[in-house]
Amino acid sequence: MHHRIHSLLEERAARTPEAVFLFEPGGTTTYVALQAMAETATQDLLDAGVRPTDRVVLVAENCAAHIALLMACSRVGAWSCGVNARMSPGEIAAIVERADARLCCFTAGASAAARLHAERAAATPARLPGVMYSSVRAEAQPEPDAALADTAAIIFTSGTSGTPKGVMVSHRGLLHFGRVSASVRSLDSRDRVYAFLPMTHIFGIGTVLMAALTGGASLVLRGSFSPADVLQALAHDEVSNLLGPPTMYARLLAHIEAERVAPRFPRLRYVYTGSAPLDLGLKQRVERLFGQPLHYGYGLSEYAGSVFLTRTEAPRADTAAGHAVEGGEARIVGIDGQEVQNGETGEIWLRGPGLMLGYFRDAAATAQVMRPGGWYATGDLGRFGEDGALFVVGRLKEMIIRSGFNVYPAEIEAVIGRFEGVHLCAVVGVPEADGNEQIVAFAEMKPGASLDEAALRAYLAEHLSPYKRPARIEVIDAMPTTANGKLLKRELQARARQTSDLQEGRR
């Protein structure tokens, strides 16, 4: 029985030591070689004075050294705090401070961005090649709460205030979801998973790394997303599993169309998306491209992996996130805290073995989202279909109030997304003086396409009630996204507010 995530690697290194686990542009890494790297990294951490429950910030992009550091933290009992190396110095400094970190490690050998951060921090070379580290504070306080000892990693997310919140992810949750995901996908040693999703986020750690280690699959490991590289890997690197957010597939389709390439994917057998709402038009385009189902799931940082997944044996024609995985439970709750009728929309509450242990040293934020009975109030809106499948409608905080009606951006986005020439769409609400919210839509067009706004508005009049139709429609060159491919609606909302303020100032 595994109790910590590093035991998965140890087991693989003992069982199939010479099997290749990582395929990187610069070469390959076997299980036994990665285990040796983890042992070297462990000694680095111990020499730096790292103790159990200490926080170790990993400023990294995907590479063998990053995985070795994750395993080393597990071996020592430290809590890794992954930070994408492409974040700004100020953002990284805020997380280092919030984590009360003892040590910062930088994957400088595989990431130019990490190397710049390392130089700025006057970091020194570690024993593990390609890694530099910098001691942050010798007085960092260990975590006294024994109930949190199972923490494997802290994943920092920013709320609407921009203040980082540290989600404490458990070993138990990661191990559980690794087993669930590997089982759902029937992963084994014949599989190669395209792995560009940052392992500083739950999608990369859980769905990619933990599942691959559990099933014995290998990773075609990349530090960032490139449509050309995805196509190259599908054609020549024997990739069997392709996973990413909806924006990844949109970018891939745009590249194929712009470059007029004919993709080859001789071994691809499982295609999956998650971490954001799925547009039906995009799903259908991806399925036409690959000639197989695009599977979908629902999860979040506060749960170590997906809580809902579509079933491989029963592909769906709609955009439901499927059914609850083993151990996962969900309920749909109204504003009165009571469960709503089947088919009605409400807030999604979750519980199960993957649920976070809380927000790091933030009891108030933890209490704000936890409910009696161990339920976590996600802030996401959803409903159950007739067959019990979950449909994710949007974010509670993103819900727009217009003329006294609740307006869900996902519904408008789905309609605009089907309009000719639209590649991606996002809808936000902007407060008005009378307490209403103005609906603003952003559209990213397909290569070479332009927006006929009059035609779009006529189309919307046929498909949406008047109160759901956007007051403004703005064309945007490219949607802002995180390194994980998640849409940054806060940036769009700020842009929409700024435009509204300018318009108000001209009146």
Image (cartoon, grey):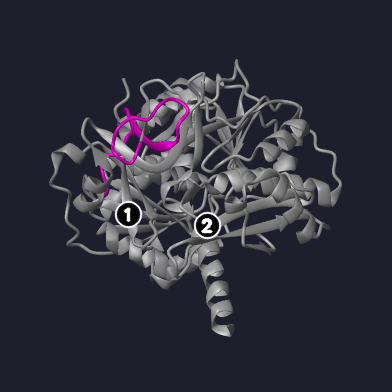
Which numbered tag is attached to residue 488?
2
Residue 357 included in the magenta stretch of the image: yes
Residue shown at 70% from the left, 57% from the top = 444
Secondary structure character of the magenta stretch overall = loop
Whether residue 26 sits left or right of residue 334 in the image: it is right
Q: Is residue 257 above or below residue 96?
A: above
Mark 2 Cα shell of 10 Å, populated few (<14), some (14-19), many (≥20): few
| Residue 49: image location, x then y, percent | 23, 54
368 or 356, which is in the foreground? 368
Q: Which residue is mark 1?
A: 165
Q: Is residue 409 visible in this depiction of the protein? A: yes
Q: Which residues are magenta?
A: 334-359
- Residue depicted at x 24% and y 37%: 371
Q: Nearer the viewer, mark 1 or mark 2?
A: 2
Which residue is found at the position 62% from the left and 22% from the top?
A: 190
Residue 411 position, x and y percent, is 59, 43
Quadrant assignment for the N terminus = top left
